[in-house]
Amino acid sequence: MRDEYLQEAQTIVEDPNALINLVSRRSKQLKHGSKPLIESLEKLEPEDVALREIIEGKITYQPWDEDSED
């Protein structure tokens, strides 16, 4: 996993546990055949692709709100 991608993604997803979950789930999807949401001229590992997708805004998340009753 590239450190510069990780640091940049941490500025977007500030909760480290949420970032780990996002990258883990997305990299599993990529390993099982899902197409990347970004284009890259270089060969990237699934984890790096997931981080780049987060950085480029292709993947978003909504923090858990314990107060909501939905």
Image (cartoon, rainbow, N blue to C red):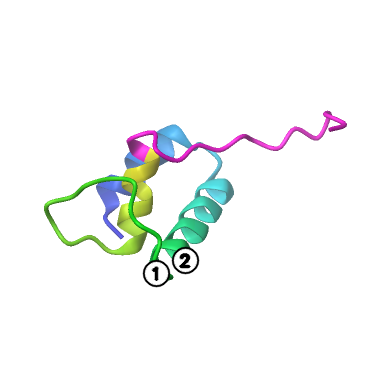
Q: At which x and y percent is residue 56?
A: 33, 35
Q: Nearer the viewer, residue 58 or 24?
A: 58
Rendered image quadrant of residue 27: bottom left
The image shows residue 50, relative to residue 24, as above or below, that is: above
Disc 1 marks which amino acid? Answer: Lys
Q: At which x and y percent is residue 63?
A: 64, 35
- Which quadrant is the N terminus positioned in? bottom left
Residue at left offset 51%, top offset 54%:
20
Q: Nearer the viewer, residue 8 or 70?
A: 70
Residue at left offset 40%, top offset 41%:
54
Residue at disc 1, secondary structure: helix
State the CA–CA distance, disc 2 to disc 1: 5 Å
Residue at disc 2, secondary structure: helix
Residue that label 2 marks: 28
Residue at left offset 39%, top offset 69%:
31
Query: Please, which residue is most extreme toward the top here?
Result: 68
Q: Which residues are magenta?
A: 55-70
Asked if the residue at tag 1 contacts the one at tag 2, i.e. Cβ–Cβ closer than 8 Å, the answer is yes
Q: Which mark is residue 31?
A: 1
Task: Residue 58: say if magenta.
Answer: yes
Task: Residue 53: say if magenta.
Answer: no
The image shows residue 58, relative to residue 20, as above or below, that is: above
Q: Which mark is residue 43?
A: none
Q: At which x and y percent is residue 7?
A: 34, 43
Disc 1 packing (10 Å; few <14; some 14–19; many ≥20): few
Query: Please, which residue is most extreme toward the left here?
Result: 41
The image shows residue 31, relative to residue 60, as above or below, that is: below
Rendered image quadrant of residue 8: top left
How many numbered badges does the structure rendering display? 2
Q: At which x and y percent is residue 48?
A: 31, 56
Rendered image quadrant of residue 68: top right
